[in-house]
Protein backbone atom coordinates (compact mmCIF):
# COMPACT_ATOMS: atom_id res chain seq x y z
CA UNK A 1 0.00 0.00 0.00
CA UNK A 2 1.36 3.46 -0.97
CA UNK A 3 1.97 5.68 2.10
CA UNK A 4 -0.54 8.52 2.32
CA UNK A 5 -0.34 11.93 4.02
CA UNK A 6 -3.14 13.53 5.94
CA UNK A 7 -3.81 16.47 8.30
CA UNK A 8 -6.30 17.33 11.03
CA UNK A 9 -8.19 20.60 11.42
CA UNK A 10 -9.15 20.53 15.09
CA UNK A 11 -7.24 18.91 17.95
CA UNK A 12 -9.93 18.52 20.62
CA UNK A 13 -11.88 15.36 21.52
CA UNK A 14 -12.12 14.21 17.90
CA UNK A 15 -8.54 15.27 17.18
CA UNK A 16 -7.32 12.69 19.69
CA UNK A 17 -9.73 9.96 18.54
CA UNK A 18 -8.96 10.44 14.83
CA UNK A 19 -5.19 10.50 15.49
CA UNK A 20 -5.29 7.13 17.24
CA UNK A 21 -7.53 5.54 14.63
CA UNK A 22 -5.59 6.89 11.61
CA UNK A 23 -2.34 5.59 13.05
CA UNK A 24 -3.75 2.11 13.50
CA UNK A 25 -4.15 1.84 9.71
CA UNK A 26 -0.35 1.77 9.47
CA UNK A 27 0.11 3.50 6.10
CA UNK A 28 -1.32 7.00 6.70
CA UNK A 29 0.97 9.67 8.20
CA UNK A 30 -0.45 12.72 10.01
CA UNK A 31 1.88 15.49 8.87
CA UNK A 32 0.10 18.62 10.17
CA UNK A 33 -2.55 19.82 12.60
CA UNK A 34 -4.46 23.09 12.98
CA UNK A 35 -6.32 24.43 16.02
CA UNK A 36 -7.90 27.77 16.89
CA UNK A 37 -4.71 28.87 18.66
CA UNK A 38 -1.11 28.10 17.83
CA UNK A 39 -0.56 27.11 21.47
CA UNK A 40 -3.22 24.37 21.30
CA UNK A 41 -2.03 23.14 17.88
CA UNK A 42 1.64 23.07 18.92
CA UNK A 43 0.94 21.29 22.23
CA UNK A 44 -1.03 18.61 20.35
CA UNK A 45 1.67 18.26 17.67
CA UNK A 46 4.40 17.97 20.31
CA UNK A 47 2.59 15.37 22.38
CA UNK A 48 1.62 13.29 19.33
CA UNK A 49 4.84 13.55 17.30
CA UNK A 50 3.31 15.51 14.43
CA UNK A 51 5.79 17.70 12.48
CA UNK A 52 3.69 20.80 11.69
CA UNK A 53 1.28 22.89 13.78
CA UNK A 54 -0.62 26.01 12.76
CA UNK A 55 -3.57 28.22 13.66
CA UNK A 56 -4.17 28.91 9.96
CA UNK A 57 -5.82 25.94 8.25
CA UNK A 58 -5.36 27.51 4.80
CA UNK A 59 -1.63 26.77 5.00
CA UNK A 60 -2.51 23.09 5.40
CA UNK A 61 -4.89 23.09 2.43
CA UNK A 62 -2.11 24.70 0.31
CA UNK A 63 0.28 21.77 0.89
CA UNK A 64 0.35 19.85 -2.44
CA UNK A 65 1.73 16.70 -0.83
CA UNK A 66 -1.41 16.05 1.27
CA UNK A 67 -3.81 13.31 0.16
CA UNK A 68 -6.61 14.05 2.63
CA UNK A 69 -7.83 16.30 5.43
CA UNK A 70 -10.01 15.59 8.49
CA UNK A 71 -12.34 18.45 9.54
CA UNK A 72 -12.82 18.17 13.33
CA UNK A 73 -13.91 21.68 14.28
CA UNK A 74 -17.16 23.01 15.74
CA UNK A 75 -20.00 22.39 13.26
CA UNK A 76 -20.33 25.91 11.83
CA UNK A 77 -16.73 25.71 10.56
CA UNK A 78 -17.25 22.40 8.73
CA UNK A 79 -18.57 24.11 5.59
CA UNK A 80 -15.87 26.74 5.05
CA UNK A 81 -13.10 24.34 6.03
CA UNK A 82 -14.33 21.40 3.94
CA UNK A 83 -15.04 23.67 0.96
CA UNK A 84 -11.53 25.15 1.07
CA UNK A 85 -10.00 21.67 1.37
CA UNK A 86 -12.02 20.32 -1.58
CA UNK A 87 -11.21 23.33 -3.75
CA UNK A 88 -7.53 22.69 -2.96
CA UNK A 89 -8.00 19.14 -4.30
CA UNK A 90 -7.98 17.23 -0.99
CA UNK A 91 -10.05 14.17 -0.21
CA UNK A 92 -12.11 15.08 2.88
CA UNK A 93 -13.43 13.35 5.97
CA UNK A 94 -15.72 15.72 7.86
CA UNK A 95 -17.24 15.17 11.27
CA UNK A 96 -21.01 15.13 11.68
CA UNK A 97 -23.33 16.92 11.31
CA UNK A 98 -21.85 17.69 7.88
CA UNK A 99 -22.81 21.39 7.96
CA UNK A 100 -25.36 23.66 9.62
CA UNK A 101 -27.69 23.96 6.58
CA UNK A 102 -28.70 21.58 3.81
CA UNK A 103 -27.73 24.21 1.20
CA UNK A 104 -24.14 24.07 2.49
CA UNK A 105 -24.16 20.27 2.48
CA UNK A 106 -25.47 20.20 -1.11
CA UNK A 107 -22.68 22.56 -2.19
CA UNK A 108 -19.99 20.39 -0.59
CA UNK A 109 -21.39 17.26 -2.22
CA UNK A 110 -21.45 18.95 -5.62
CA UNK A 111 -17.85 20.20 -5.36
CA UNK A 112 -16.56 16.83 -4.17
CA UNK A 113 -18.34 14.94 -6.94
CA UNK A 114 -17.28 17.40 -9.65
CA UNK A 115 -13.67 17.12 -8.53
CA UNK A 116 -13.93 13.33 -8.18
CA UNK A 117 -12.62 13.47 -4.62
CA UNK A 118 -13.38 10.95 -1.89
CA UNK A 119 -15.79 12.45 0.67
CA UNK A 120 -16.92 11.01 3.97
CA UNK A 121 -19.12 12.22 6.82
CA UNK A 122 -18.07 10.57 10.05
CA UNK A 123 -21.16 8.54 10.95
CA UNK A 124 -18.84 5.99 12.52
CA UNK A 125 -21.50 4.43 14.76
CA UNK A 126 -22.75 2.35 11.83
CA UNK A 127 -19.50 0.43 12.03
CA UNK A 128 -19.81 -1.70 15.17
CA UNK A 129 -19.49 -5.33 14.01
CA UNK A 130 -22.84 -6.50 15.42
CA UNK A 131 -24.57 -3.39 14.03
CA UNK A 132 -23.26 -4.37 10.61
CA UNK A 133 -24.60 -7.87 11.30
CA UNK A 134 -28.10 -6.35 11.65
CA UNK A 135 -27.64 -4.65 8.25
CA UNK A 136 -26.84 -8.00 6.67
CA UNK A 137 -29.68 -9.80 8.51
CA UNK A 138 -32.10 -7.28 7.02
CA UNK A 139 -30.59 -7.66 3.53
CA UNK A 140 -30.83 -11.45 3.84
CA UNK A 141 -34.54 -11.14 4.72
CA UNK A 142 -34.04 -12.50 8.26
CA UNK A 143 -36.00 -9.63 9.84
CA UNK A 144 -38.90 -9.87 7.37
CA UNK A 145 -40.70 -6.61 6.56
CA UNK A 146 -39.60 -3.75 8.78
CA UNK A 147 -42.55 -2.64 10.92
CA UNK A 148 -41.36 -0.66 13.96
CA UNK A 149 -38.18 1.21 15.01
CA UNK A 150 -37.65 2.82 18.39
CA UNK A 151 -34.83 4.03 20.57
CA UNK A 152 -32.85 6.86 22.04
CA UNK A 153 -29.53 8.64 22.11
CA UNK A 154 -29.19 9.86 25.69
CA UNK A 155 -26.31 11.55 27.51
CA UNK A 156 -26.00 13.52 30.75
CA UNK A 157 -23.00 15.80 30.26
CA UNK A 158 -25.09 19.00 29.89
CA UNK A 159 -27.43 18.30 32.84
CA UNK A 160 -26.55 21.34 34.94
CA UNK A 161 -26.87 24.95 33.90
CA UNK A 162 -23.17 25.29 34.70
CA UNK A 163 -22.32 22.67 32.02
CA UNK A 164 -20.98 24.42 28.95
CA UNK A 165 -19.58 23.67 25.51
CA UNK A 166 -19.52 25.41 22.10
CA UNK A 167 -22.43 23.11 21.13
CA UNK A 168 -24.72 25.18 23.38
CA UNK A 169 -24.29 28.22 21.13
CA UNK A 170 -26.27 28.13 17.86
CA UNK A 171 -23.64 30.31 16.17
CA UNK A 172 -21.00 27.56 16.56
CA UNK A 173 -23.27 24.50 16.58
CA UNK A 174 -26.23 25.24 14.29
CA UNK A 175 -29.85 25.58 15.37
CA UNK A 176 -30.30 22.01 16.69
CA UNK A 177 -28.00 20.73 19.43
CA UNK A 178 -29.05 17.32 20.81
CA UNK A 179 -30.72 16.45 17.51
CA UNK A 180 -27.69 17.55 15.47
CA UNK A 181 -25.06 16.14 17.80
CA UNK A 182 -26.51 12.70 18.52
CA UNK A 183 -29.90 12.54 16.77
CA UNK A 184 -28.02 12.77 13.45
CA UNK A 185 -26.25 9.48 14.34
CA UNK A 186 -29.54 7.81 15.36
CA UNK A 187 -31.30 8.73 12.12
CA UNK A 188 -28.29 7.82 9.97
CA UNK A 189 -27.89 4.40 11.56
CA UNK A 190 -31.56 3.47 11.48
CA UNK A 191 -31.84 4.33 7.77
CA UNK A 192 -28.57 2.51 7.00
CA UNK A 193 -29.78 -0.63 8.77
CA UNK A 194 -33.37 -0.76 7.59
CA UNK A 195 -32.59 0.44 4.06
CA UNK A 196 -35.63 2.71 4.43
CA UNK A 197 -35.61 6.52 4.26
CA UNK A 198 -37.31 8.57 6.97
CA UNK A 199 -40.28 10.00 5.04
CA UNK A 200 -42.08 12.10 7.68
CA UNK A 201 -41.35 13.49 11.15
CA UNK A 202 -43.34 14.92 14.05
CA UNK A 203 -40.95 16.49 16.54
CA UNK A 204 -41.11 18.05 19.99
CA UNK A 205 -38.04 19.85 21.38
CA UNK A 206 -37.32 21.21 24.84
CA UNK A 207 -34.64 23.56 26.13
CA UNK A 208 -34.78 22.99 29.89
CA UNK A 209 -32.10 25.58 30.65
CA UNK A 210 -33.20 28.76 28.92
CA UNK A 211 -30.02 30.35 30.22
CA UNK A 212 -26.70 28.69 31.01
CA UNK A 213 -23.66 29.90 32.87
CA UNK A 214 -20.76 30.21 30.45
CA UNK A 215 -17.28 29.90 32.00
CA UNK A 216 -15.03 32.79 31.13
CA UNK A 217 -12.24 30.37 30.08
CA UNK A 218 -12.47 27.78 27.26
CA UNK A 219 -14.01 24.35 27.91
CA UNK A 220 -13.10 21.03 26.27
CA UNK A 221 -15.84 18.57 25.29
CA UNK A 222 -16.96 16.40 28.24
CA UNK A 223 -14.65 18.23 30.69
CA UNK A 224 -17.40 20.28 32.38
CA UNK A 225 -17.50 18.10 35.50
CA UNK A 226 -13.95 19.04 36.47
CA UNK A 227 -14.55 22.81 36.34
CA UNK A 228 -14.98 24.97 39.44
CA UNK A 229 -18.03 27.12 38.66
CA UNK A 230 -16.71 30.33 40.14
CA UNK A 231 -16.50 32.64 37.20
CA UNK A 232 -19.44 32.45 34.78
CA UNK A 233 -21.47 34.71 32.52
CA UNK A 234 -25.21 33.98 32.23
CA UNK A 235 -26.21 33.62 28.58
CA UNK A 236 -29.55 32.83 26.88
CA UNK A 237 -29.73 29.41 25.16
CA UNK A 238 -31.83 28.53 22.10
CA UNK A 239 -30.46 25.06 21.28
CA UNK A 240 -32.47 22.12 22.64
CA UNK A 241 -31.50 19.80 25.51
CA UNK A 242 -34.07 17.14 24.60
CA UNK A 243 -36.06 16.04 21.58
CA UNK A 244 -38.72 13.43 20.83
CA UNK A 245 -39.53 12.50 17.25
CA UNK A 246 -42.21 10.27 15.72
CA UNK A 247 -41.04 8.96 12.36
CA UNK A 248 -42.41 7.25 9.27
CA UNK A 249 -39.89 5.04 7.43
CA UNK A 250 -40.64 4.27 3.81
CA UNK A 251 -44.39 4.00 3.24
CA UNK A 252 -45.30 1.52 6.00
CA UNK A 253 -42.90 1.36 8.95
CA UNK A 254 -43.41 3.55 12.00
CA UNK A 255 -41.24 4.54 14.92
CA UNK A 256 -40.09 7.00 17.55
CA UNK A 257 -36.87 8.11 19.20
CA UNK A 258 -35.67 10.56 21.82
CA UNK A 259 -32.41 12.46 22.14
CA UNK A 260 -31.12 14.00 25.34
CA UNK A 261 -28.04 15.60 26.85
CA UNK A 262 -29.69 15.83 30.29
CA UNK A 263 -30.48 12.22 31.26
CA UNK A 264 -28.62 11.64 34.55
CA UNK A 265 -26.45 8.54 34.41
CA UNK A 266 -26.75 7.96 30.68
CA UNK A 267 -23.26 8.68 29.40
CA UNK A 268 -23.53 7.78 25.74
CA UNK A 269 -26.58 5.54 25.43
CA UNK A 270 -27.22 5.12 21.74
CA UNK A 271 -29.84 2.39 21.59
CA UNK A 272 -32.37 1.11 19.10
CA UNK A 273 -34.82 -1.71 18.50
CA UNK A 274 -36.00 -2.79 15.06
CA UNK A 275 -39.00 -5.08 14.80
CA UNK A 276 -39.74 -6.92 11.57
CA UNK A 277 -42.43 -9.38 10.56
CA UNK A 278 -40.08 -12.31 11.35
CA UNK A 279 -38.05 -11.18 14.40
CA UNK A 280 -36.76 -8.18 16.33
CA UNK A 281 -33.26 -6.92 17.10
CA UNK A 282 -32.04 -4.61 19.86
CA UNK A 283 -28.65 -3.02 20.48
CA UNK A 284 -27.13 -0.44 22.83
CA UNK A 285 -23.78 1.31 22.54
CA UNK A 286 -23.30 0.82 26.29
CA UNK A 287 -22.90 -2.95 25.54
CA UNK A 288 -21.55 -2.71 21.99
CA UNK A 289 -20.57 -6.35 21.40
CA UNK A 290 -24.03 -7.72 22.26
CA UNK A 291 -26.94 -8.18 19.87
CA UNK A 292 -30.36 -9.23 21.15
CA UNK A 293 -32.55 -11.12 18.70
CA UNK A 294 -36.19 -11.52 19.71
CA UNK A 295 -38.49 -14.29 18.48
CA UNK A 296 -42.22 -14.77 18.84
CA UNK A 297 -42.34 -18.59 19.11
CA UNK A 298 -38.83 -19.67 20.13
CA UNK A 299 -36.43 -18.49 22.86
CA UNK A 300 -34.79 -15.12 22.33
CA UNK A 301 -31.04 -15.01 21.63
CA UNK A 302 -28.11 -12.81 22.63
CA UNK A 303 -25.25 -12.97 20.13
CA UNK A 304 -21.81 -11.87 21.30
CA UNK A 305 -19.50 -10.35 18.69
CA UNK A 306 -17.39 -13.12 17.21
CA UNK A 307 -16.23 -12.71 13.62
CA UNK A 308 -16.34 -16.46 13.06
CA UNK A 309 -20.11 -16.40 13.82
CA UNK A 310 -21.13 -13.14 12.12
CA UNK A 311 -22.21 -12.69 8.51
CA UNK A 312 -18.85 -12.52 6.66
CA UNK A 313 -19.55 -8.95 5.46
CA UNK A 314 -20.14 -7.89 9.10
CA UNK A 315 -17.11 -9.88 10.28
CA UNK A 316 -15.02 -7.59 8.04
CA UNK A 317 -15.76 -4.84 10.64
CA UNK A 318 -14.18 -6.89 13.45
CA UNK A 319 -10.40 -6.99 13.70
CA UNK A 320 -10.24 -9.07 16.88
CA UNK A 321 -11.48 -12.59 17.64
CA UNK A 322 -14.54 -13.34 19.78
CA UNK A 323 -14.18 -12.46 23.45
CA UNK A 324 -11.99 -9.43 22.66
CA UNK A 325 -14.12 -6.31 22.90
CA UNK A 326 -14.26 -3.75 20.09
CA UNK A 327 -15.64 -0.35 20.92
CA UNK A 328 -16.16 3.27 19.98
CA UNK A 329 -12.61 4.03 18.79
CA UNK A 330 -12.62 0.93 16.57
CA UNK A 331 -15.64 2.26 14.66
CA UNK A 332 -13.60 5.27 13.52
CA UNK A 333 -10.82 2.95 12.38
CA UNK A 334 -13.33 0.92 10.35
CA UNK A 335 -14.52 4.08 8.54
CA UNK A 336 -10.95 5.25 7.89
CA UNK A 337 -9.89 1.83 6.57
CA UNK A 338 -12.53 2.01 3.87
CA UNK A 339 -12.07 5.74 3.15
CA UNK A 340 -8.29 5.52 2.74
CA UNK A 341 -8.60 2.36 0.62
CA UNK A 342 -10.64 4.56 -1.74
CA UNK A 343 -8.13 7.44 -1.55
CA UNK A 344 -5.33 5.01 -2.44
CA UNK A 345 -7.38 3.37 -5.22
CA UNK A 346 -10.34 5.31 -6.69
CA UNK A 347 -11.80 2.03 -8.00
CA UNK A 348 -12.24 0.72 -4.41
CA UNK A 349 -15.87 0.47 -3.17
CA UNK A 350 -17.51 3.44 -1.39
CA UNK A 351 -18.52 1.47 1.71
CA UNK A 352 -18.54 4.39 4.14
CA UNK A 353 -20.95 7.26 4.86
CA UNK A 354 -20.55 10.03 2.27
CA UNK A 355 -21.51 13.68 1.92
CA UNK A 356 -24.74 12.40 0.29
CA UNK A 357 -25.59 10.87 3.70
CA UNK A 358 -24.52 14.13 5.35
CA UNK A 359 -26.86 16.08 3.04
CA UNK A 360 -29.74 13.72 3.81
CA UNK A 361 -28.99 14.19 7.51
CA UNK A 362 -29.11 17.98 7.19
CA UNK A 363 -32.42 17.82 5.30
CA UNK A 364 -33.87 15.66 8.09
CA UNK A 365 -32.64 18.05 10.78
CA UNK A 366 -34.28 20.96 8.99
CA UNK A 367 -37.57 19.00 8.80
CA UNK A 368 -37.32 18.18 12.52
CA UNK A 369 -36.92 21.88 13.30
CA UNK A 370 -39.79 22.81 10.96
CA UNK A 371 -42.02 20.20 12.61
CA UNK A 372 -41.18 21.31 16.15
CA UNK A 373 -41.70 24.97 15.26
CA UNK A 374 -45.02 24.38 13.49
CA UNK A 375 -46.13 21.69 16.02
CA UNK A 376 -47.16 19.42 13.14
CA UNK A 377 -46.16 16.47 10.94
CA UNK A 378 -43.73 17.38 8.15
CA UNK A 379 -43.04 15.24 5.08
CA UNK A 380 -39.42 14.79 4.10
N1 LIG B 1 -18.48 11.01 15.24
C1 LIG B 1 -18.51 11.13 16.56
O1 LIG B 1 -18.73 10.16 17.27
C2 LIG B 1 -18.26 12.47 17.20
C3 LIG B 1 -18.03 12.60 18.57
C4 LIG B 1 -17.75 13.85 19.10
C5 LIG B 1 -17.72 14.97 18.28
N2 LIG B 1 -17.98 14.83 16.95
C6 LIG B 1 -17.94 16.01 16.05
O2 LIG B 1 -16.59 16.43 15.93
C7 LIG B 1 -16.52 17.86 15.80
C8 LIG B 1 -15.57 18.39 16.87
O3 LIG B 1 -16.09 18.08 18.15
P1 LIG B 1 -15.13 17.95 19.42
O4 LIG B 1 -15.96 17.35 20.48
O5 LIG B 1 -13.85 17.30 19.02
O6 LIG B 1 -14.86 19.49 19.74
P2 LIG B 1 -13.69 20.11 20.62
O7 LIG B 1 -14.21 21.38 21.18
O8 LIG B 1 -13.13 19.10 21.54
O9 LIG B 1 -12.56 20.45 19.52
C9 LIG B 1 -12.77 21.42 18.52
C10 LIG B 1 -11.43 21.76 17.90
O10 LIG B 1 -11.64 22.67 16.80
C11 LIG B 1 -10.58 23.60 16.83
N3 LIG B 1 -10.92 24.82 16.10
C12 LIG B 1 -11.87 25.74 16.39
N4 LIG B 1 -11.79 26.76 15.51
C13 LIG B 1 -10.79 26.47 14.63
C14 LIG B 1 -10.22 27.12 13.52
N5 LIG B 1 -10.70 28.30 13.09
N6 LIG B 1 -9.17 26.55 12.88
C15 LIG B 1 -8.69 25.34 13.30
N7 LIG B 1 -9.17 24.68 14.35
C16 LIG B 1 -10.22 25.23 15.02
C17 LIG B 1 -10.34 23.86 18.30
O11 LIG B 1 -9.07 24.49 18.49
C18 LIG B 1 -10.44 22.44 18.86
O12 LIG B 1 -9.19 21.80 18.74
C19 LIG B 1 -17.95 18.35 15.94
O13 LIG B 1 -18.48 18.59 14.66
C20 LIG B 1 -18.70 17.21 16.59
O14 LIG B 1 -20.07 17.14 16.21
C21 LIG B 1 -18.24 13.62 16.41
Image: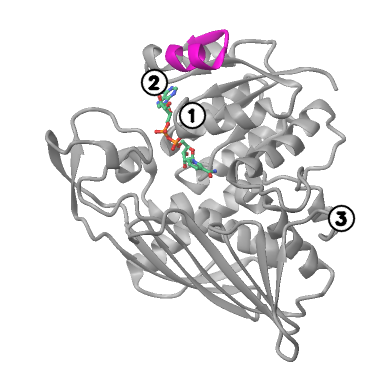
The 10 Å Cα crowd at callout 2, few under 14, some 14 to 19, many 20 or more, is some
Q: Quadrant location of the C terminus?
A: bottom right
* First of labels 1, 2 by sequence position: 2
* First of labels 2, 3 by sequence position: 2
Residue drawn at 47 percent across, 25 percent down = 11
Please give the label number shown on residue 80: 1
Quick check: 132 above or below 108?
below
Contact between labelled residues 2 and 1, with CB atoms less than 8 Å apart: no
Residue pointed to by mark 3 = 312
Nearer the camera: disc 1 or disc 2: 2
Callout 1 secondary element = helix
Q: Position of residue 258 (x, y in %)?
A: 44, 67
Residue drawn at 47 percent across, 26 percent down = 10
Name the outermost residue toward the bottom. Answer: 297
Label 2 near ligand 1 (CB < 8 Å): yes
One can see residue 195 in this view? no
Q: Position of residue 6 (x, y in %)?
A: 65, 20
Q: How many marks?
A: 3
Q: Quadrant of residue 118?
A: top right
Give the magenta-colored segment's residue range.
Answer: 42-53
Amino acid sequence: MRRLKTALIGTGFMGKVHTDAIRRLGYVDIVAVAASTIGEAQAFADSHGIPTATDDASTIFADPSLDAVHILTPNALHFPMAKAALLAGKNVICEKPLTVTSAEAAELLEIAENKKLAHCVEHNLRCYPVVQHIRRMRENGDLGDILIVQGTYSQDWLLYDTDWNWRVEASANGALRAMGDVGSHWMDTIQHLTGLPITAVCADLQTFHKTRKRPKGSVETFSGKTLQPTDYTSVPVTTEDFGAVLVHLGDRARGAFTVSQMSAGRKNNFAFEIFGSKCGVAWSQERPDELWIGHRNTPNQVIIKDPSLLDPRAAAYADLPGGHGEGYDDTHKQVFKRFYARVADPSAPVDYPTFADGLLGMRLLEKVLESATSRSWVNV
